[in-house]
Structure formats: C-alpha cells, structure tokens
C-alpha cells in the first residue's frame, strides 16, 4: 500500500474521530446546560446510532447524602417508561398467537363488569378504554392490612365504579389499563409478569441492571429520587428545598410504573427491539409503534403502550417518559435513539431529547414544533409564541403542531411553577386549535392559577360550549361561583 493511500486513510480516520468528538462535545453542552437550569443532581445518557451505542455517559451525583457519583452502572427509577416493556410483552404474546389486539378484554379475563367487557386490548394499550382510574381509590400505603390496602379489596371496589366514558371515545391516561394488562400477561404466559419480563426481555440481553422495585426494596447501585418542594408539613417555605422522594408501587400494578434501569441497558433493549430479538415480525413492530383510531376516526396520541410519540411524515419518533425524571425516543427511520435518566422528579428530560437527537440529525430539530418553539422562545421570549409559530407555519411545511404535545409541554412548565411561560403556550394552543374544548379548559386552568379569574371563567365557558360534557369545566365554575 502506497504512502499516499495510507496517509489518506489516516486523514479519514482523524476526520471521522474529530467529527464524532465534536458531536459528543455538543451533546455535553446541552446536558450541562439542562442540568444547571433544571437543577438535576445526577443524569445518565445513552445515544444509539445505526445499531450501536455511540454515547454512554454519566454526570453528577447519584446519592446526595453520601456524595456518590453517577456511573454507567447506576440504576435509576424509570416509572411510567415501564409501560413500553409491558407493551412489548403483550406484543410477544400476540406473536405467540395468544392475544388478538382487536379482541375484547373479556376474551382473556373473567368476572369483569358488563360495561368493561367490550374494551379491546388496543384500547387498553392506547388509554382509550374509559376504565375508571385505579389511582382514584389506591391507598398511599398499599400493603397494610385493611380496607383498600390490598389488591383484592381494591379490585372489588374498582369494579363498582362507573366507566369514565364510552370505550374509544377519547383519551384518558390511567393506571387501570396497565394493571389489567398485567393480569392478562400472568394468565396467558402462565407465570408472574416479572418472571416473564425477565425471561423474555432482560436475561436474553444481559440487562443485569434492570429490575422491578420501589423505595421499599434494597437495590444495589441505586440512585434515590429527589424533588424540589415549596411546601412541607402544611407550611410554605421561603424557597424550594430538595427532599427525598418516597414512593411505593405495589406489585400488582408494577406493569405500569415499577421498573428501574440504566441508560445503557435501555439502549441495548432498543437495539434488540429494532433488530428482531424481542419481536421477530417487523410488521408487528410497526403496529406497536402506530396509533389506533378513536370512534370518530381521528388518531390517538398514543401508540400501543408507547406514550410519547411524534407521528410525522419525516423523522417519526416513538418513546415514553416516566415520573418527570426519565425519558427516551426512538427514531425508526433514522436509525437513532436517545435515552436520558435522572434522579430528579420534575426534571422532565423529554423537553430536550429532540435537541440531543438533532446533534446527530439537524433536520430533527426543525421537524419537531415543540423543540423549535422551545429553542426559539428561549431567545425571543415566550410572549412571542404566537408570532413565531405563525411565521414558521408559512415557511416550513414540516411545522405541524400537535395539540396534545403542546398541551403536555405547557403542563410540564406549570408543574415547575413556570406559570408565565405556561400561560403563553396554553394561549398558543387555543390560537392554533380554536375548536378544541380541551385547549380552552387547559388555558382556563393556568389563568385561574395566575389570578385572572374573569378571563378563566370566559375560557371555561368557551370550553363547555365546545363540549357540553366537560365535567371538569362545570365543576370548576361551580366552585368559583360558590367562592364569590
């Protein structure tokens, strides 16, 4: 081989290496900025590109009490991200020929109330079932002996509650779906769901750091979860304080929010999912990553068990978030995935996942309206949300905002007490979707929180005008009227 060829190969290697390092540098800048702004103690990130983990890094402190640093083997709670593992378990049973997604739940579970029986597996996976929510009756100290403190008592009480709405009529996120899916997995797999998950997902992939558990369980190398609190013991503090977050996920509902993992384990799980190691059928994988239709023909915001999705023509993304502390997105057509885990409830890493993905594919940032708005409003000010959105709509055909995503983003800001910013985004949603009852209801909620009661009343009335069945709006208006 000539010197010229060797030298050319050397330059190519150096160029490729520098290019990769430049991307990692940009990723780290985003991570450090977000950790500082969101006051995140500890974080893990993994990025998958073309079937390989190209970034696997850890930052900050895992355990503040003992000043233990985050490592790549530190285990984090992933909360509702558990639901995607449950979705995969259901699809594995579909592939086994044991489940028909369009079949009613009564085909698989006995002793259900009559109103529940027609609900399909598809509707349970997409939270369009209309089931009453388990959390409405769940005692915070489940496990104790007594009324509504064990599965049997809760199950019997749950079955007496009326349906929230007709199946397939609308979307409503609730934990009953995950609970019942767990019961189906137990019955059809012939073993407890935790064992089925381990044997068919974790063990084959060497996911040694992925396991079920909550604050009651002793988990090695575990990062406790923290929260910032403004009120403690009924008293308002002069400033927010970082506190330990104690949480319990009773065994019977851990299919909804019971897993803990590492970014590396989850990245390897995503690779296995895309390469047919978990679900062999590519068409079945695509079905799992697609929405279903409501009764009126419109599409659901959720795919089958996957709740954080970008159903767009280019750079489609599917994923999930959990507990405001863990989130990930998979880009099936781009060979890309981003996983971010933190130990701070309310960190909402889902807000900056697309910006991280944009480091590896710049087109992604402009393809996602929320990411575009978040980056540009950071510079221009949130009061210019409508102006910037309208300008972008005229020049960018990919700028197709989702009412659901914008609403979720605004609620995340409201949860962090960023009321001024949330107000502008809820206002934007009303501007973009003037015929949406939910958009007006959400806007009214933040108006009420910011003290603008008269305008809030107008928005609630508008919401009820668009949807006469808006029980929440009617209830709030009654409460306002009583307080006068």
Image: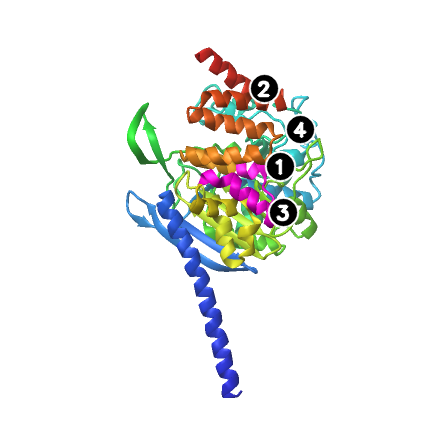
Q: Which is more foreground, mark 1 or mark 4? A: 4
Colouring used for the render: rainbow
The residue pinned by badge 3 equals 312
Q: CA distance from mark 1 to mark 4?
A: 14 Å
Q: In front: 61, or 387?
A: 387
Q: Which is more foreground, mark 4 or mark 3? A: 3
The residue pinned by badge 2 equals 161
Horizontal and vertical percent position of residue 150:
49, 25
Relative to 204, say whether 435 is above or below.
above
Q: In front: 375, or 5?
A: 375
Q: Are marks 2 and 3 in contact (CB under 8 Å)?
A: no
Which residue is depicted at the point 55% across and 53% down? Answer: 364
Within the image, what quadrant is residue 417 found in?
top left
Q: Are marks 2 and 1 in contact (CB under 8 Å)?
A: no
Q: Earlier in the sequence, mark 3 or mark 1?
A: 1
Q: Is residue 31 left or right of residue 174?
A: left
Q: In front: 193, or 72?
A: 72
Relative to 21, say whether 139 is above or below.
above
The residue pinned by badge 1 equals 125
Q: Which mark is drawn over residue 169? A: 4
Mark 1 surroundings: few (<14), some (14-19) or many (≥20) residues within 10 A: many
């Amino acid at each position: 081989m000539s010197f010229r060829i060797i030298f050319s190969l050397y330059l190519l290697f150096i160029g490729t290496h520098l290019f990769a390092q430049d991307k990692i540098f940009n990723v780290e800048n985003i991570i450090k900025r977000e950790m500082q702004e969101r006051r995140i103690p500890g974080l893990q990130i993994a990025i998958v590109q073309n079937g390989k983990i190209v970034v696997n890094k850890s930052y900050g402190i895992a355990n503040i009490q003992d000043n233990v640093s985050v490592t790549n083997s530190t285990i984090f709670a992933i909360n509702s991200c558990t639901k995607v593992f449950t979705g995969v378990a259901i699809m594995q049973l579909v592939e086994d020929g044991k489940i028909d997604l369009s079949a009613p739940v009564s085909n698989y579970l006995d002793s259900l109330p009559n109103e529940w029986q027609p609900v399909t597996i598809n509707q349970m996976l997409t939270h369009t079932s209309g089931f009453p929510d388990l959390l409405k009756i769940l005692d915070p100290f489940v496990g104790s002996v007594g009324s509504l403190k064990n599965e049997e008592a809760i199950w019997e009480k749950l079955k007496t509650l009326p349906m929230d709405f007709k199946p397939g009529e609308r979307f409503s996120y609730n934990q009953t779906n995950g609970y019942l899916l767990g019961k189906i997995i137990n019955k059809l797999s012939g073993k407890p769901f935790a064992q089925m998950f381990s044997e068919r997902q974790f063990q084959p992939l060497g996911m040694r750091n992925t396991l079920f558990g909550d604050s009651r369980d002793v988990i090695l190398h575990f990062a406790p979860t923290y929260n910032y609190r403004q009120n403690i013991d009924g008293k308002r503090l002069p400033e927010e304080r970082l506190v330990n977050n104690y949480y319990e996920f009773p065994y019977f509902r851990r299919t909804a929010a019971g897993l803990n993992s590492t970014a590396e384990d989850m990245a390897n799980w995503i690779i296995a999912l895309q390469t047919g190691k978990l679900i062999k059928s590519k068409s079945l994988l695509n079905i799992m990553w697609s929405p279903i239709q409501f009764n009126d023909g419109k599409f659901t915001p959720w795919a089958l068990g996957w709740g954080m999705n970008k159903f767009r023509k280019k750079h489609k993304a599917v994923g999930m978030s959990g507990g405001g502390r863990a989130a990930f997105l998979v880009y099936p057509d781009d060979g890309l995935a981003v996983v971010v885990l933190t130990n701070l409830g309310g960190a909402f890493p889902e807000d900056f996942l697309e910006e991280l993905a944009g480091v590896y594919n710049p087109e992604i940032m402009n393809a996602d309206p929320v990411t575009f708005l978040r980056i540009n409003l950071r510079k221009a000010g949130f009061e210019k949300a409508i102006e910037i959105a309208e300008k972008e709509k005229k020049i960018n055909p990919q700028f197709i905002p989702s009412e659901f995503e914008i609403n979720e983003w605004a609620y995340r800001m409201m949860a962090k007490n960023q009321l001024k910013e949330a107000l502008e985004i809820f206002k934007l949603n009303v501007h973009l979707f003037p015929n949406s009852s939910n958009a007006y209801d959400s806007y009214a909620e933040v108006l009420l929180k910011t003290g603008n009661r008269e305008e809030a009343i107008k928005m609630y009335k508008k919401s009820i005008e668009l949807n006469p069945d808006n029980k929440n709006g009617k209830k709030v208006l009654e409460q306002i009227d009583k307080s006068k």
